Every structure is written in structure tokens, then in C-alpha cells.
Image (cartoon, rainbow, N blue to C red):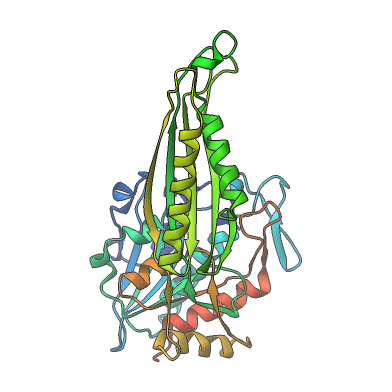
Amino acid sequence: MKLMAIRGPSCHEAKVAAAIVAPIKRAGLSESAITFDSAAKRTPDPGDVGNLIVRLPGSFKAPRRLMSAHMDTVPVCIGSQPTRKGRLVTSRDPNTGLGADNRAGCAVILTALLEILRQDLPHPPLTFCWFVQEEIGLQGARCVNRQLLSRPKIGFNFDGGSPAKLTVGATGGYRMKISVSGIAAHAGGAPERGVSAITVASLAIADLERNRWLGRVVKKSGVGTSNVGAIHGGAATNVVTDDLTLLAEARSHDPKFRKKILNAFIEAFERAVKRVKNENGDHGKVTINDRLDYESYRLKNGLPCVEIARLAGLQVGLEPELAVANGGLDANWLNAHGIPTVSIGCGQINQHMTNEALDLNGFDQACKMGLILATAAS
């Protein structure tokens, strides 16, 4: 409840990290075991704190395990006022999300760590990591200092919905920054001299929609999704807008098809910029900068991390189901870093929405699974 109430959108997780560190220190863990990496200085958007990493030596010999979750929330959760009604937690303010995505995950692995310290429970070598900037492209996991993780062999990432859902695969995603340059002119006195960047973008988006490259994309060659999520530009109604920036994304489990979606965006904007001309025949220009946010992955059945997670779910009375997600998770990059990682839900409902909620029955089961996964010998 305390963690969900903290303002901590992407790049502003310092207060969340401080709230996690405080009870760890009170439980008696040496400060030498607690560290922050410099990931926030290497991400595309600098943040106020890096990934929080806590390492414990094992009380028995076994491969090191990673327990992870992310600290940031989406902007709609700023101002969350968590309130409990029975076994459900929601935000008292109907205009904000709750922030259970992913403060619930943070609390699950924090609970496991605190119980190990308070009860002096036997455990394998453990690394706990609270990642930053997950919601803006998994940047904390991408830029994590892998040396500070101490080479874990398997990982368990707490993020998602029901704890019965074990996510063993996820889609890959490209992020695009589209810059459209037009020609400014007086919108009342000489609009014919201008080239509207807004018109160019509108034509390109309409083209993508008409040819079914926007939203859910289903073609003979593959399946994916795309979205134009933000548009910034213009300052006055009496000026033909000469500068516009759009933020967009393309996702697919198939890297080749994801590239086709990206190419469809490039071609649509190139066609649009050539169509819009002023009285002199001049047109604007478009620049698209894209980057791979995360690559898709799919864990094979029978891997130790999958089997251990499945058995933990059975121990707490669940019927675990293996799932493949159409969204990105920190596990995308953990698997890319060579750490086979399963993601486990924590009872979150309607993530990224104002009616987000936390099912406390699911959360309790996730906490029990977290402790099992952090202490089980195999």
C-alpha cells in the first residue's frame, strides 16, 4: 500500500527505491550488500536513480537465482490513493491508476528478502533487482550492470496478472521517433506558401490505417501490432505548422514481420511528404529514427526456471499455465543477457487503466511463490 502511493513514473524512481531500501536496512542487512548501478545514466532518457541490486551469499551450494521486478509506473498512476475494500485494492481517486503494476511485484520480492533475513531461512545464492524504466522500453533491464548481478543462472521476474500465469515468452518491439519538417507560413495571409507538417502526418496515418498497418496487423506474412502513441508540434492557429514529432511503435514475435511493419511506416510517411507541396512545388521532409527496444523470446518447456516456477505454483494451490505475452517484460532483456527468466503475475488487474486493481488473494499467492522460489533447494 505504501509503495503504490509513491509518485514514481519512469526516470523518477528514487523515492520508490528509498522506500524499498529502508526496511531492508532495518532487517539488519549490511549496506555493502545493497548497491545501485549506473543504468539511469546510460538509458535514452536519464533518470534520478539506477537499478537497485541486493546480493546474498547462499547458505548452501547451488546456482545463483535472480528475483526481479520494476519500480516505475505509467503516468496515469501518479496521484494513486490506494484503498482496500475486502480482498481488493483500488485507487480512491477514480482519475488515477493504482500502480499495482508493478509495485505489487516490488513488494513480492521485498517480502521474500525480508522473510529470509528475519527468519534466517536457508537459501541459495540470491540476487534481488528492482529495475527502473521498464514502462518506457525495458531500459533498466537493458542497461543493467550485469557484473553486479553476479551471474545468476536462472531468474524469476514478478510482473503481470494472475500468479497462475507463468509467462515464458514475449513479443519484441521497435520504437520510432518520426520527425516531420514542413514550411512555415502565415495561415491567414499566405497559407499557399506553407507546407503543413500536420497534414503530412495525417495523410501518412490515414494511409497506414487504410492499408491495415495500424493497430492489430494481420497479414499473410505475419501478425503484429503498431501504434502512434504521441504527437507533438505546432504553437498557433495562424501559422502553418512546420515541425511535428510523432512517437510510434511496432511489435511482433517474428523479427522479420516486425521489420515489415516498420517499413510500412517509412513508406507511408515518404509518400505523404511528397504529396503535400506549396505553390512553388516545395515539400517538406521526414526523418524516422528507430531502435529495438527488446527482442522476442520463447523459453523451452522443461527448462529449470520453468519447472521450478510451475512446482511453486502447485505448492500454493494454483494450476499454473504457460503463457506468451504480446507486451514486453524485463524478462525479454534478462533472457537476452543469458539469464533464462520466467515472469509471474502478482494479482494485478486492468494494468495501465484508471480502474486498475490488485486482487489480494493473488498477491498473497505470489508472495508465497516468491519465498518458495527464493529458498527452494531445487
- Compared to residue 223, the image places residue 95 above or below, namely above
- Compared to residue 6, the image places residue 369 above or below, namely below
Q: Is 137 on the left or on the right of 350, as rendered?
A: left
| Image x and y of residue 265, in percent | 47, 49
User: Would you say residue 367 is visible in this rendering?
Assistant: yes
Instruction: Quadrant for residue 301, please give it.
Output: bottom left
Q: Judge by depth and name the residue closer to the eye, 230 or 66.
A: 230
Q: Quadrant of the N terminus?
A: bottom right
- Compared to residue 196, the image places residue 327 above or below, namely below
Identify the residue shown where x is 61% and y is 49%: 209
Q: Judge by depth and name the residue closer to the eye, 357 or 43.
A: 43
| Image x and y of residue 341, in percent | 41, 76
Q: Farthest top residue?
A: 189
Instruction: Quadrant for residue 377, please give it.
Output: bottom left
Q: Farthest left residue?
A: 147
Q: Quadrant of the C terminus?
A: bottom left
